[in-house]
Amino acid sequence: MKIGFIGLGNMGAPMAINLAREGHEIKGFDVIADVPEGVAKAGTAAEAAKGAEVVITMLPNGEILKSVAAEILPAMKAGAVHLDCSTVDVESARFVAQEAEKAGILSLDAPVSGGTGGAAAGTLTFMVGGSAQAFDIAKPLFDIMGQKAVHCGPSGNGQAAKICNNMILGVTMIATCEAFVLADKLGLPRDKMFDVVSTSSGYSWVMNAYCPAPGVGPKSPADNGYQPGFAADLMLKDLRLSQMAAEAADADTPMGAQAAELYRRFVEEEDGQGRDFSAMLPRFEGRHRG
Ligand code: NAD
């Protein structure tokens, strides 16, 4: 396929490399990053989009997505697919989908989980909103860049799935970290805590696959000085998106709100910026109640 790829940062570059390796013809554009090997360089976003059957965007936020969409949609050919893999707010995703429809372009919101490791290995999970027709066109590309793509329904539903998942993840990480600190204070060894909880009703992906306690459970960022992994800053971004969506939809999400506030403090006022989101554990260790 002829593919335009806009936003070649930590995630976009390895995704574009995987597509190029499978023989797709990629034209890339980024305002700062260089195009990776195997990708032809375009001078503008519109140039990358012109003539492409699919244009992929992998951008930092909804405002940037909207401005890039305004450039690329008029340049794209009718019936082509705009595949946005960025994590953005549900409203921006739905707005961009409407603009695409007006321009005769098919569109999908398809945020990912799996991080930079998954992007490099081609093992991302895509959560996809948009028409079945667009999903079918993009499916072979999902198969290269990822291991699973779930069609979640109409436009915006991919973003909805992503922020709901990450709200659970953020809340669960905090609950797991505070439970470890309570266990420490009660004299319960961490390996015993892991042994019990990972096979009891408190188990979770956080405990079982990404344990925030160093030296306990499978290898995780905790064993690597809390280098990300999944940075606390990105968790804060996703929790903010979930709270924006909760407000707009009038959903009551008190635990999500509390998690967003704790990660805000951690990233903006403490030493959380640039650390893995599981570094909530050392944060709690150094603190007392109140
Ligand atoms: P990044 O900052 O490394 O990459 C974004 C790229 O977009 C940058 O290279 C930037 O120069 C480029 N860009 C910004 N404005 C542009 C414009 N107007 N035109 C063209 N290019 C522009 O970020 P990332 O880590 O690659 O994340 C991309 C998206 O994926 C984000 O929405 C993020 O939330 C999401 N995401 C990231 C991860 C992760 O682990 N990094 C995991 C899941 C989802």
Image (tube, rainbow, N blue to C red):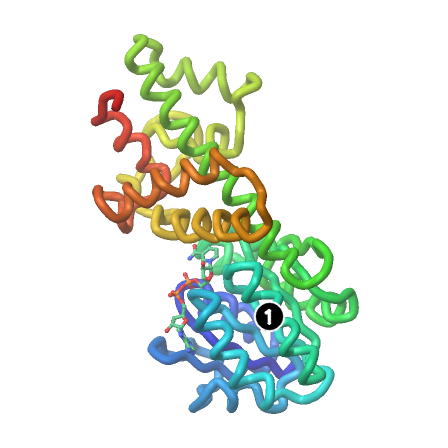
Say few, some or many: other residues with alpha carbon within 10 Å of mark 1 (under 14 / 14 to 19 / 20 or more): some
Q: Which quarter shows the C terminus?
A: top left
Picture coordinates of residue 285 (x, y %)? Answer: 25, 25
Residue situated in front as seen by the camera: 163 or 183 = 163
Picture coordinates of residue 137 (x, y %)? Answer: 73, 72
Identify the secondary structure beneath mark 1.
helix
- Taking the view exactly as shown, the residue that stands out farthest to the right is 133
Above-or-below relation of 275 to 199: below
Q: Residue at x 49, y 39 (%)?
A: 169
Residue 223 visible somewhere in the drawing = no
The answer to whether the residue bearing label 1 lies less than 8 angstroms from the nearest atom of ligand 1 is: no
Picture coordinates of residue 153 (x, y %)? Answer: 73, 57
97 vs 43, left or right, is: right
Above-or-below relation of 76 to 37: below
- Please tell me how many numbered marks the rendered image carries: 1
Q: Residue at x 28, y 41 (%)?
A: 266
Q: Residue at x 43, y 33 (%)?
A: 173
Above-or-below relation of 278 to 25: above
Residue 136 visible somewhere in the drawing = yes
Residue where numbered disc 1 is placed: 95
Above-or-below relation of 4 to 194: below
Q: Amino acid at mark 1?
A: Phe
